[in-house]
Image (cartoon, helix red, strand yellow):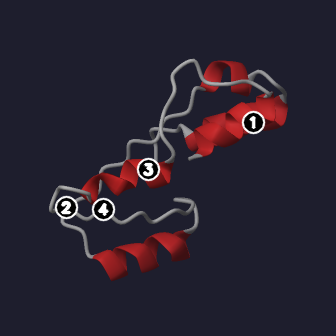
Amino acid sequence: MIRRHYDDEMGVNSLVRFASCTARLDVERGVRLTIEAFPGDLQDHAFVFQTIQRFEPEAIVHFAEQRSAPYSMIDRDHAVYTQVNTSSER
């Protein structure tokens, strides 16, 4: 969901149209599948702990992506934010 925030902050629109998170989670219509979203910050340990405790997943796959080049060049704060949120050391 953060991509929309980046685009809004930079005053740009994505070249690729993508449905809202709500619409993408609405795949259960016509399919016997329920997908639940847990919006939050993975740096917030209490959120992560509570989510995992509640959901009890067998596995976790994190598909987060940040289009970092233009965003990270705005200023130092954006560069640091990009480095923290795209670190493979986590």
Q: Are marks 2 and 1 in contact (CB under 8 Å)?
A: no
Where does residue 32 sit, x and y in percent of width and height? 15, 62
Find disc 3 in the rendering and name its residue: 23
Measuring 71% from the left and 26% from the top, which residue is drawn there? 71
Q: In this view, does 33 lie to the left or right of 14?
A: left
Amino acid type at circle 3 is: Ala
Q: Name the residue under label 2.
A: 33
Q: What residue type is labelled 1?
A: Asp
Q: Can you tell which of label 1 and label 3 is closer to the viewer?
A: 3
Q: What residue type is labelled 4?
A: Ile
39 and 57: which one is in front? 39
Q: Is mark 1 on a helix, strand or loop?
A: helix
**Which badge, 1 or 3, is on the more N-terminal residue?**
1
- Compare marks 4 and 1 and give the one earlier in the sequence: 1
Q: Circles 4 and 1: CB distance less than 8 Å?
A: no
Quadrant of residue 4 in the image? Answer: top right
- Indicate which disc, 3 or 4, sits on the residue closer to the N terminus: 3
Closer-to-camera residue (9/53):
9
The CA span between labels 4 and 2 is 7 Å
